[in-house]
Image (spheres, rainbow, N blue to C red):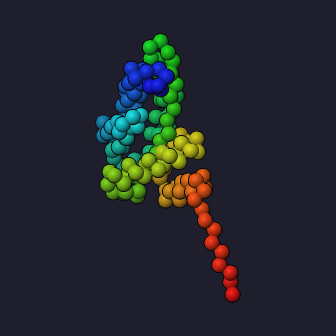
């Protein structure tokens, strides 16, 4: 976006995205911009995977509407990764890492969101290995 429409337009888009996200959150929720076009949202209370999925659906619906910037209608999309405490980690770094894995899976699968699961990591690692020709076959004859 910055390369084609300029940094000013990119900055305005991020500001409007942040406002839309903020409008969906409750007082007990926390949002932060991690950098670039990445945001993290910490849902307060007992959200669970159902609450996370419901919030993800609301976010995706809110971002489907075009953004009006400098007489242009700009469409944005999002990929959302969900990690739950304490199921997927008990500290911020682990939870962010696991949410990032889930987001990558959602992006690759062209789904709006994904909830972290250990099998997601294995699937992502296998796809990476296949794509980068990193698998090696070893054969051991049985006597």
Left or right relative to 75: residue 48 = left
Residue 122, visible in the rendered structure: yes
Spot occupied by residue 46 in the image (x, y as percentages of width and height)? 37, 49
What residue appears at the point 46 percent right and 34 percent down from the top-left corner?
59
What residue appears at the point 50 percent right and 39 percent down from the top-left corner?
79
Spot occupied by residue 119 in the image (x, y as percentages of width and height)? 53, 59
Q: Nearer the viewer, residue 133 or 80?
A: 133
* Quadrant of the frame with the C terminus: bottom right
What residue appears at the point 51 percent right and 32 percent down from the top-left corner?
77
Spot occupied by residue 56 in the image (x, y as percentages of width and height)? 47, 40
Q: Quadrant of residue 44?
A: top left
Q: Nearer the viewer, residue 67 or 25?
A: 67
Left or right relative to 85: residue 117 = right
Q: Nearer the viewer, residue 139 or 53?
A: 139
Report the label total. Answer: 0
Q: Quadrant of residue 11?
A: top left
Q: Nearer the viewer, residue 100 or 80?
A: 100
Spot occupied by residue 66 in the image (x, y as percentages of width and height)? 51, 22
């Amino acid at each position: 976006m910055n390369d084609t429409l300029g940094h000013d337009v990119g900055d305005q888009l991020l500001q409007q995205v942040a406002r839309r996200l903020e409008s969906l959150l409750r007082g007990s929720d926390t949002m932060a911009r991690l950098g670039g076009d990445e945001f993290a949202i910490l849902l307060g209370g007992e959200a669970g995977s159902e609450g996370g999925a419901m919030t993800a659906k609301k976010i995706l619906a809110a971002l489907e509407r075009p953004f009006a910037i400098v007489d242009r209608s700009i469409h944005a999309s999002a990929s959302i990764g969900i990690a739950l405490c304490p199921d997927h980690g008990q500290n911020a770094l682990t939870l962010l890492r696991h949410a990032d894995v889930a987001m990558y899976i959602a992006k690759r699968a062209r789904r709006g969101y994904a909830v972290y699961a250990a099998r997601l990591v294995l699937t992502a690692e296998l796809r990476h290995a296949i794509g980068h020709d990193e698998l090696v076959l070893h054969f051991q004859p049985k006597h």
